[in-house]
Amino acid sequence: MPASLPELIVTASTVQPEAARALDVASAADSRVAESATSAPATAAAAATVPAARKRPRPGERRVQILQALAGMLEQPGAERVTTAALAAKLAVSEAALYRHFASKAQMFEGLIEFIESSIFTLLNQIVEREGAGQAQAQKIVAVLMQFGERNPGMTRVMVGDALVYENERLVARMNQFFDRIESTLRQVLRNAAEAQGSSTPTVEANAQASVLLSFMIGRLQRYARSGFKRMPTEQLEFSLKLLVA
């Protein structure tokens, strides 16, 4: 299944340990100062006031941290509109620091949408290429989106548009295109299934069934977000799909 955004962050073990080396140097300096404390108290006092070196994020790491923090804030049930001031406070940085990595808050949301698109469409392409029957492919497509939303609550609020209220209109348009692409993929696999079954109107049947499945997915995601993430999208999913995809 797709990884959640926090898993994309560089782990602590991969970051150059400048801070650790700085602490080692400081520790050694303290030892030398202690040994000469009786002869040089002024020097010891000065060494004690030297601040530890501050570790700087690696290139690109701060950008991912900002997106992770934004997604985390969206996961809070009943969360209001996320402001850049609140986001900066959560990261303990200035708002100006945010804008060194993103030109606007809309661009931050676009970063989340890009993650959603990349995760889902990579999996959908694999399903279309590897799965056999069209109906099985359709069921897999629905399951992938439901499982992704369940594992990424903040992303669910972006997908259904709750987090995009009062934000740039292009964000809502982009999410609409996201669902249009999913419906198009469903039409393709369901039309193949209808043709294999000898249907006289495979396109009509596929379009109708894809529309129903898309409505089902959006409805499940909306219920999940509006229930405070209590009603899971995958609730009785297998039985529901048997009813929807005969």
Image (tube, rainbow, N blue to C red):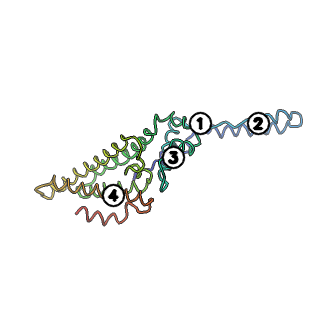
Q: Which residue is mark 3?
A: 69
Residue positioned 54% across, 45% down in the render: 86
> SS for tag 2?
loop
Asked if labels 2 and 1 touch by Cβ distance under 8 angstroms, the answer is no
N-term mark: 4 or 2: 2
Number of numbered labels in the structure image:
4
> SS for tag 4?
helix
Label 4 vs label 3, nearer the camera:
4
Q: In 3D space, how far apart are the residues under numbered discs 1 and 2 (Cα atoms)? A: 21 Å
Q: In 3D space, how far apart are the residues under numbered discs 1 and 3 (Cα atoms)? A: 18 Å
Crowd around label 4: few <14 · some 14–19 · many ≥20 (10 Å): few
The kind of residue on which mark 3 rests is: Ala
Residue positioned 29% across, 49% down in the render: 182
Crowd around label 2: few <14 · some 14–19 · many ≥20 (10 Å): few
Taking the view exactly as shown, the residue that stands out farthest to the left is: 200
N-term mark: 1 or 3: 1
> SS for tag 3?
helix
The kind of residue on which mark 4 rests is: Gly
Taking the view exactly as shown, the residue that stands out farthest to the front is: 166
Q: Which residue is mark 4?
A: 219
Judge by depth and name the residue closer to the eye, 131 or 206: 206
Res. 40 image quadrant: top right
Q: In 3D space, how far apart are the residues under numbered discs 4 and 3 (Cα atoms)? A: 26 Å
Judge by depth and name the residue closer to the eye, 34 or 78: 78
Q: Which residue is mark 1?
A: 56
Judge by depth and name the residue closer to the eye, 93 or 63: 93
